[in-house]
Image (cartoon, grey):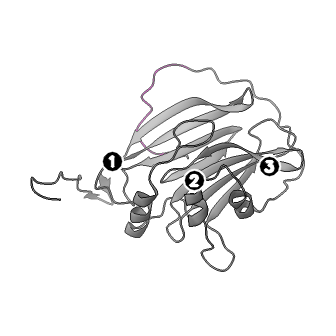
Amino acid sequence: MGPWAASGTAMAGLAAFGLLAVGCSTGGTGTRDEGPARTDTVARTPPPVTPSTTSAPVKKVDAARLVLGDPKVSKQVKADLKPCAQDAYPIDTSYGNLTDGPAHDVVVNVMTCGDAVGIGTYVYRRVDDTYKNVFAVEAPAVYSTIDRGDLVVTQQVYAKGDPVSYPSGEIVTTYRWSANKFTEYDRVENEYSRVVDGDVVEEPQPASPGES
């Protein structure tokens, strides 16, 4: 299932969910190649490339059980995390080297059933024989990926009246592991075109006086 498929039903659920921010960083955001060029002009020197320390075979985890048993995950996300069909949970799981640890880190994205709209994203680091939550963002339309050792978090941005399928833009934030925590390294804000398949998506209109 794709992370950005959506419907009006999902939007209503997201409105009830609200914006929650938890974990070691503020805000949250996944990756999108298209969109306007970045607006920041400050040059950044990329860090030296270091070999991966996680050459061992990937040890798979039960992501649903990991999230449901995590005290840092909100009660709302746990309540919304239910199998969509039989034992199939709406969860995407990625494994990679994010924290320079001896084992692969685990990125878990929790989504809604059917529409696959992200409601929470988490990073787990293996410590001894357990997995420790070292990063979390709980917000509508959030999704994380691993990009060459960086954690990239994307959050869709909706103006009032936007349908779930056509957000106004996105915020893409890159985090890097430093001093035993994730630190924001880069942020890009993209505004989407209102033209979709040759048609212009109507701008949200403010309510007239007296309208509720």
Q: Nearer the viewer, residue 158 or 149?
A: 158
Find out whether the residues at labels 2 and 1 contact each other: C-beta distance under 8 Å.
no
Identify the residue position indicated by label 1 in the image.
193
Q: Answer few, some or many: residues within 10 Å of disc 2's Cα (few below 14, many 20 plus, some between 14 and 19).
A: many
Q: Quadrant of the C terminus?
A: bottom left
Residue appearing at x 88%, y 52% in the figure: 57
Q: Taken as a whole, is the magenta stretch helix, strand or loop?
A: loop
Residue appearing at x 60%, y 48% in the figure: 144
Identify the residue position indicated by label 3 in the image.
131
**Mark carried by residue 172:** none
Sooner in the amino-acid sequence: mark 2 or mark 1: 2
Which amino acid type is shown beneath numbered disc 1? Ser
Residue appearing at x 85%, y 55% in the figure: 59
Cα separation, mark 2 vs mark 3, equals 17 Å
Q: Nearer the viewer, residue 70 or 162?
A: 70
Instruction: Report x, y in % for residue 177.
Output: 71, 32
Instruction: Give the left or right position of residue 210, taking residue 152 as reference.
Output: left
Instruction: Report x, y in % for residue 170.
Output: 44, 44
Sooner in the amino-acid sequence: mark 3 or mark 1: 3
Question: From this viewpoint, is residue 61 visible?
Answer: yes
Instruction: Give the left or right position of residue 94, taking residue 189 as reference.
Output: right
Asked if 145 appears above or below 52 in the picture, the reply is below
Q: Which residues are magenta?
A: 33-43
Asked if 26 appears above or below 34 in the picture, the reply is above
Cα separation, mark 3 vs mark 1, equals 41 Å
Instruction: Report x, y in % for residue 163.
Output: 34, 60
**Mark carried by residue 120:** 2
* Closer to the eye: label 2 or 1: 2
Q: Answer few, some or many: residues within 10 Å of disc 1's Cα (few below 14, many 20 plus, some between 14 and 19).
A: some
Asked if 83 appears above or below 159 in the picture, the reply is below
Which amino acid type is shown beneath numbered disc 2? Gly
